[in-house]
Amino acid sequence: MARSDLRLRVLMEPRHGARYDDILALARATEDAGFDAFFRSDHLLGVDPADTTYRPTDCWTTLGGLARDTTRVRLGALVGAATFRQPGILATIVASLDEMSGGRAELGLGTGWYEREHAAFGIPFPGTGERFDRLEEQLAIITGLWRTSPFSFEGKHYRIDDNRTPPRPVQDPHPPVIVGGSGPRRTPAIAARYATEFNGALGGDLRERYATFHRACEAIGRDPAEPRLSAVLPVACGATPAEAARRGEIIGSDFIREHAAVGTPAQVVDRIGDLADAGADTVYLHIYDIHDLEHVALLGAEVLPHVARPALTAMPVGRGLRGGAGGGT
């Protein structure tokens, strides 16, 4: 059963990386526009590994800065790479962010996928099966440290030996945990055990992914209605079809463009409605031009009010041209 409290969030994916001041400006624009949360990707390279203009920043370091430089939006990663950090350290990092932000931290965590990125920064990149094993052990350790004292863990890849001073986040019992992906077996099984929110990733049959996740919850005796369900929507919105098309040109790959909402506010509202109909109660608007703060302001002014609680509302006649820009529906 879908929730009635649909949340709209902003997800930053900079084309060429970013300085902290750029990230802060976008986060503050997100907060000013009224969105629920500001999330960022956890990458050290851009989609094009040959892009020598890319400026890497550490995900959790910048979120720590935002914890002090913003006041309301929730903060997190969609999603962090389990290959990047040891689980005990990551549990402490996120708990610190939670304390610094007054209880606004969220942990998104995945297996990691970008092999070239790992090679470029000297990070080991094991095979797919091992990455899933490590993700599962990391989630067991992180949530265990947050919930239990003393805490010990003996796994194939990680060991925690009698930790009597574990990190303590502000949120009770701990910050929300987001797990997601398109895999039909291990991803939903891991999410069913550990996730507060399951993200259905991009492309494919979102409704079926949610159904698979619900079956995984039922298999371990968890109420499928408890966790939230989220989706990612790359977006290029414009007050006119021409403006939307211009913003759409910035979206990177053909795959992302194929699944993006490129159009006027009415078209973006329609696409969010499609995701809500599929079961999503949280939608991350994927933003690529991080310097285009007017884009975020437009989404906040002309899209967010129509993603209403308890349901999406139709836009007034004349408030957007349907079918104007390519890829809008």
Image (cartoon, rainbow, N blue to C red):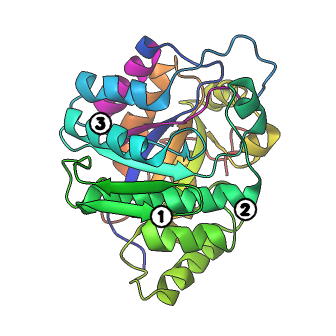
Residue tagged by mark 1?
A: 154
Q: Is residue 68 something that shows in the picture? A: yes
CB under 8 Å between discs 1 and 2: no
Segment colored magenta: 22-47
SS under mark 2: helix
Name which of mark 1 and mark 3 comes first in the sequence: 3
Question: In screen coordinates, is 148 left or right of 81?
Answer: left
What's the amino acid at mark 1?
Glu
257 or 58, which is in the foreground? 58
Comes first in the chain, label 2 or label 3? 3
In the figure, 36 relative to 192: above or below? above
Q: Residue 4, relative to residue 270: is it above or below?
A: below
Apparent side of residue 170 relative to residue 289 in the rendered image (left or right): left
Amino acid on which disc 2 is placed: Gly
**Tag of residue 129:** 2
Q: Which residue is mark 3?
A: 97
Residue 260, placed above or below residue 222 = above
Q: Is residue 193 left or right of residue 260?
A: left
Q: Residue at 42% of width from left, 74% of height from top?
A: 2
Q: How many residues crowd around disc 3 within 10 Å: few (fewer than 14), some, or many (20 or more)?
A: many
Query: Which comes sooner in the sequence, label 1 or label 2?
Result: 2
Q: Is residue 303 magenta?
A: no
Residue 32 colored in magenta in the image: yes
Q: Nearer the viewer, mark 1 or mark 2?
A: 1
- Check disc 3 and report its element: helix, strand or loop: helix
11 on left or right of 258: left
Secondary structure category for the residue under label 1: strand
Verify CB contact (< 8 Å) between mark 1 and mark 3.
Answer: no
